[in-house]
Image: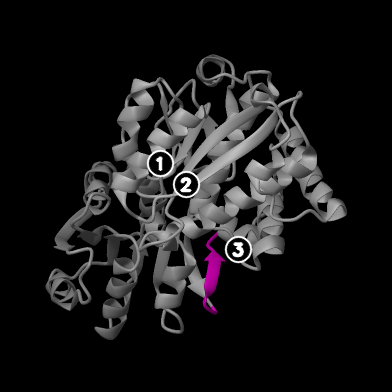
Amino acid sequence: MKRNFKGKVILFLALTFLLIIAGCGGGNARNATADTNDEDVVKIGVIVAETGPASTLGSSQANTVKLLQKQLDAAGPIDGKTIQLVKHDYETDDTKAVVAMDKLISDGVVAVVGATQSSTSMAIMPKAIEKKLPLFTIAPIESDSEYVYSMAHSTTVIAMPIVEYLNKNNIKKVAWLNAADGFGVTGKPAFEALAKENGIEIVAHEEFDATATDMTIQLTKVRKTDPEAIIVWSRTPGAGIVARNYKALGFDIPMIQSTAAANDGFLEQVKDDNQNIMVVGSKLSVVDQLPDSEQKEILKGFKDSYAEDFNGEPDLFAAHLLDGIQAILEAVKAGHVTTEDIQQYLQNDMGKYLGATGTFDFGVSQASPEADGISVISIENNTWKFND
């Protein structure tokens, strides 16, 4: 069945209002449930890289967990059930993430949201499948398991706005650069298929080590093929290094980077020298520039609440985590509080769900939200700018 979008907006804003009038603090989940019987607590597991190299992506996710727990504590139990978000920082170490997954399973969580990186998500996924535990992944992965729900856009969906931009600007020859890691190598096959359908040719393909500190050699080779745009598939810090090298070499053609570069860390890397540099980013980052819509209300509610608590702005990675937790809460609000019942609800009854990342319909696909939550965005005055 189709969800009531306006009801979701009202609930989100109501929770925010409760926080303001209550003046509540950090919302420690374990303290909040100290006097509550275990059967009255619904535990949701979260695994994020709050520290370590991937914290450039995971820190906003960790903040979002704190924000949501604070809102949940202020709003009170849902149908008599207290919601406890049990967060683990895996410190950008896949082995520690697997240990955290075991701990969450032993703690009796009803579902898990995580992890920040694709490789980490793949590492914890077998345990979720084995236990028939709904896993809401917040990094791009591919899985055909009924227990895996991707909150992050698939590579094909991420490529869609890039191809749309290229067509709109009559660009038919592009160069492709990617990091030679688990994330970097996933983009080209998806883009290549869409490019072929749209008469777009990849005239150069170069790879680089994700830990490299200079990609000038690869870009110099690219220049010889005379591309009309450069597509980059890498996460920070490599994404920013490629962009700086591109500017240093004096390229005057557009560079478009993947969603993994849509964060403040990348903005800082290209500060004051970012003309023609774009990313596939969340509409959350440009919400004040969007036309009025149901989606804008949801995005603005999240952005304003996050800014109040953390004096910063949430990003696409935070939105992935928000949508994963909210999907589980939708099931709880519908009266489903066991792992099995939540799974059945998600599979059969949830219908369309408008989240901060985009529209989900698990009955149609668990592989990705739709592309309505992302866009090719540029940089102006060192901040993101929405391109109509």
- Where residue 93 sits: x, y (%)? 31, 52
Where does label 2 land, which residue?
Answer: 88
Q: Quadrant of the N terminus?
A: top right
Residue 385 painted magenta: yes
Where does label 1 land, which residue?
Answer: 100
Total numbered circles: 3
Task: Check the image and name the residue furthest to the front.
Answer: 35
- Where residue 350 sits: x, y (%)? 59, 21
Q: Residues within 10 Å of mark 3 (few under 14, many from 20)?
A: some
Question: What residue sits 58% from the left and 16% below the top?
Answer: 349
Where does label 3 land, which residue?
Answer: 313
Question: In whole angstroms, how far apart are the C-alphas of marks 2 and 1?
Answer: 6 Å
For marks 3 and 1, give the one nearer the viewer. 1
- Side of 134 where 120 appears, left or right: left
Question: What residue sits 24% from the left and 41% below the top?
Answer: 193
Task: Check the image and name the residue furthest to the right.
Answer: 21
Mark 2: which amino acid? His
Question: What residue sits 30% from the left and 29% below the top?
Answer: 126
Question: In whole angstroms, how far apart are the C-alphas of marks 3 and 1?
Answer: 28 Å
Q: Camera-side residue: 116 or 349? A: 116
Mark 1: which amino acid? Ala
Mark 3: which amino acid? Glu
Disc 3 + disc 1, Cβ < 8 Å? no
